[in-house]
Image (cartoon, rainbow, N blue to C red):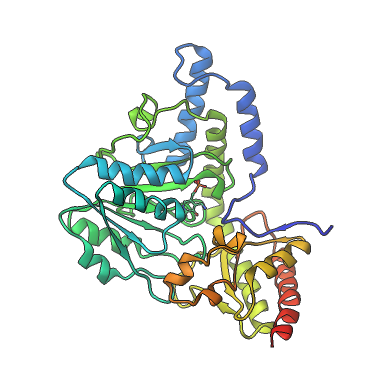
Amino acid sequence: MNATVYLDNNATAPMLPEVMTAVMTSMQDCYGNPSSKHHVGDMAREALMQARGKMAALLSAAPAEIVFTSGATESNHLAILGALARDPARRHLIVSQVEHPSIRSLLPRVQQMGVRVTDIPVDSRGVPDMEALRHALTEETALVSMMWVNNETGVVMPVAEAAALAASRGVPIHVDATQAVGRMPVDMRACPADLLSFSGHKFHAPKGVGGLFVRKGFVLPALLSGRQERGRRGGTENVAALVGLGVAAELAGQHLLTGLDVVRSWRDRFEALVAARIRSMRINGAGTARIGNTSHLSFPGLNAETIIHRLDKAGICVSSGAACAASGTEASHVLLAMGQSEEMARSAIRVSFGVCNTEEEAILAAETLCDVVQPLLNRAA
Ligand code: PMP
């Protein structure tokens, strides 16, 4: 078996050794319930407070603006259902066509609740139409929800512009920043979003923890009742995993200053090497801003599943980007929204790098990918 080259960081990023050590130490030493009024509880509460402070620092937010959750799926639900519960007179929700399934799958449910949903279309690069957003906003709009970085293509969305448009009509905005936090600067003093989702396992913290930034003064009814998280999210906090999240946030702050340009250079080198050998390859999201770690490539005439399977046999882990497409059932809703045919959408693979990779791995992945794709293209010709 070849050594594993893990290039699926958008699905989940491996825990950093420092994070793992902090989690294990905390599990041993900080077993108390942070709500308990004795010294063991105090220790857990202190650990939680430190983790919150570190997460807040990464986002340039105040610690009180961080609500810890079980991850971005819950944060997205809390944001949308909370915003709808805030003002029963507002029965309108605006989202983009390329949102993550944790948001798209919620839409039929909110529609059943009598909420009107407007889907903002995207262009062929995957960028939402800001004119459509401008026209969609009404006094009845409860929330605009837009992702910052698309999990499949890596396209960076114009969230600042969307937030300004929403604010001009007095409409709050939620940003799903799951693929952005820890990978590019996210500064809540500069970003005017009211709500912002993040997830630990995308930036080398454990799975099952994340949070929602809730801007000071923004009243958001809870999804899970209880006293924890200042009444905004009930349930005993996952202290050890959150300690890990804090350490990962701290490290992300440091990597943001140094590591991200390096990851982008590996990604660019990878794409250049593939482009040089496979002329028909297309980069999805080309021509607009993309995050530096993600490469979403289409190979017209081929099936992504075959490529992914062969790469896996060679030790290289990538994905198709769309969870459902992995089982061959559905083409990516993101690529379809970008105007691609089903066949074209089924030919795309997502290669997502991270700080745990190396340049050698990027080069090896490019060469192996070309070695896999070229014979398939020859056969298809
Ligand atoms: N939003 C986006 C953009 C994502 O990429 C993901 C994870 N794939 C989620 C939400 C859901 O995150 P979690 O796994 O923490 O529930």
Q: Which residue lies at the image location 28% right of the left edge and 39% below the top edge?
A: 216
Q: Is residue 60 visible?
A: no
Q: Which residue lies at the image location 62% right of the left edge and 74% below the top edge?
A: 271
Q: Measured from the top left, where is residue 96 in percent x and y?
A: 35, 62
Residue 244 position (above or below residue 185): above
Q: Measured from the top left, where is residue 90 in percent x and y?
A: 19, 48
Q: Measured from the top left, where is residue 370 in percent x and y?
A: 72, 77
Q: Is residue 81 left or right of residue 35?
A: left
Q: Measured from the top left, where is residue 5 in percent x and y?
A: 73, 59
Count up the numbered dots. 0
Which one is in front, 354 or 3? 3
Quadrant for the N terminus in the image: bottom right
Which one is in front, 170 or 184? 170
Residue situated furthest bottom in the rendering: 381
Which one is in front, 264 or 24? 24
- Snapshot quadrant of residue 337: bottom left
Quadrant for the C terminus in the image: bottom right
Residue situated furthest top in the rendering: 38
Q: Is residue 322 left or right of residue 142?
A: right
Residue 17 position (above or below residue 139): above
Q: Which residue lies at the image location 49% right of the left edge and 34% below the top edge?
A: 51
Q: Is residue 155 visible?
A: yes
